[in-house]
Image (cartoon, helix red, strand yellow):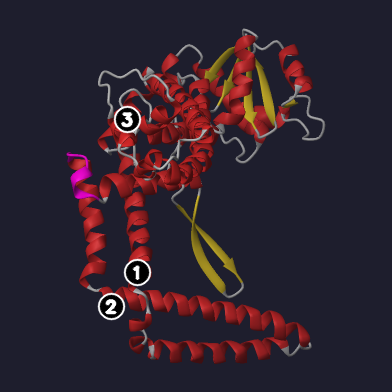
Amino acid sequence: MRILGLDVCKSSVVGWLLDTEETLPKSFREYFRKNRRPKDNDPLTFSANITGVTQLIELKPDAIILEPTGIHYSWIWAHICSIEKIEVRWVGHAEVKHFRKQNKLPDKNDQADAAALALYAFTHWHNDEFFLHFNAGNVARLRELWLQLQSINRIQSAPINRVRQQLAKEFPEAALSASKVADDGMVPLWAWLAGQERNTKRKSQYYDRLYAKSIAPKYGVNISDFSRTLANLLCDLRDWENKIEAEIGQLLSVPEFMNYRKVMTRFGIGDRQQALFISQIYPITKFESLGRFKRRLGMAKDEESSGDKESHKTGGSQLCRSQLYLWVYNRIAPAHARPQNDVGQKLGEFYDQRKSQFQDNPELWKAKALARTQKKAMDELRRSLKESLLPMLPKDQQPQIEAILNLTLQNMQLSLEGSLADKTSDVKEREIKRGFGNLVISQTAAYGLRLLFKELKRTV
């Protein structure tokens, strides 16, 4: 049997081929040293194109071994090999890492990673519990469908705004109607405008009655074909959205995702958000630390330092971060919407405690906001002065002038801080509330991820 370990890169894979008829090496480290290949023109590096795929298949492996990291890059290789009747096995990131360390194989080396995968599979081939069992296509498809939903939402915005503008003169009583999605998956106002039949148990005549009393037809203003065509477009988009949501529901119901869903449901995370988060973190075994988990879901803290300027920003997936904010805003911030369990209680208490810090001492947060603004201004002034003044001076004078400049700016900063108490009344209350509200949401989201990581590790 021929086992091919594959370390997946963005546009290629690096392989390591083992034959199970060979004797298992006593020292994997020595085995790797003797058999490692030069990086240039490596015959077992395959590009993600027809040539690379053909070369891989020509090796005639009986099985390929993959890690579920970079799942969207590895999916195509797993898919192709499955079509070619080559067995695909998955090994958890933690298991491979420990195996590589235990056998003293090099770190940060593509060939060593591929060798570790092949040797791990060779060692544990007949023990099924040492391998992961999941369909990589389900994970990739979840993310693809979620992104499609986001695209449809963006596409809908323009026609919705335009048709409401039209209704302001053609049916003003309904122009600002919320018209939420009904039990048949349609938006009643758009369905009524488009004249579409609805599959609902309760037949409503609401818009018929409202239009009968409208001032527009009374004064000779009818609903235009333009408005009805836009409404038809919105109905078609809504149908498309319903189909995507149905497929997401089917994917989320597969057994491999059930424990993830149970945990996320306890946190009050909705189906759409579950689809995105699961597509990012499945399987949880690939995360050994909370930091990597938080980065994957968009809540990592990245340092950005340049010269005298030092700052931190939130890093990771912006898509996930925005969904985490919405989750806290809709399910944790309102006390009545919180999950009625121990998780909801912990998250609610955390949010309320952070929020009370502002409510109990608003002047303190005004002062902090003003201090941040002043520090930002001083950092920018320091940077611009150095960039404009220092290059004009001889190099031997630059350190001396820079020291004087820093001392002067520090004195200016102290002077500003001394007058801070008299300036807090100038800070707008609305801006402080908005900034502090975002901070509380961000902190609660980060705390929620800490709890979520712990629960997923314990449950899954």
Boundaries of the magenta span? 334-341
Q: Which residue is labeled 1 in the image?
A: 430
The percent position of residue 412, horizontal first and vertical second, equals 50, 90
Q: Which residue is labeled 2 in the image?
A: 363
Q: Is residue 236 left or right of residue 306?
A: left
Which quadrant would the N terminus be assigned to in this image? top right
Q: How many marks?
A: 3
Q: Residue furthest front?
A: 219
The residue type indicated by label 2 comes to Glu
Which quadrant would the C terminus be assigned to in this image? top left
Q: Is residue 335 magenta?
A: yes
Q: Mark 2: few, some, or many residues within 10 Å (few <14, many ≥20)? A: some
Between disc 3 and disc 1, whose residue precedes? 3
Q: Main secondary structure of the magenta part?
A: loop
Q: Is residue 422 left or right of residue 357?
A: right
Q: Which residue is labeled 3 in the image?
A: 208
For the question of whether residue 460 can be seen, the reply is: no
The residue type indicated by label 1 comes to Arg
The percent position of residue 401, horizontal first and vertical second, equals 67, 90
Q: Mark 3: few, some, or many residues within 10 Å (few <14, many ≥20)? A: few
Element on which disc 2 rests: helix
For the question of whether residue 432 can be seen, the reply is: yes
Q: Nearer the viewer, residue 359 or 371?
A: 359
Q: Residue at x 22, y 57 (%)?
A: 352
Q: Is residue 345 magenta?
A: no
Tag nearer the camera, 1 or 2: 1
Q: Is residue 228 left or right of residue 10?
A: left
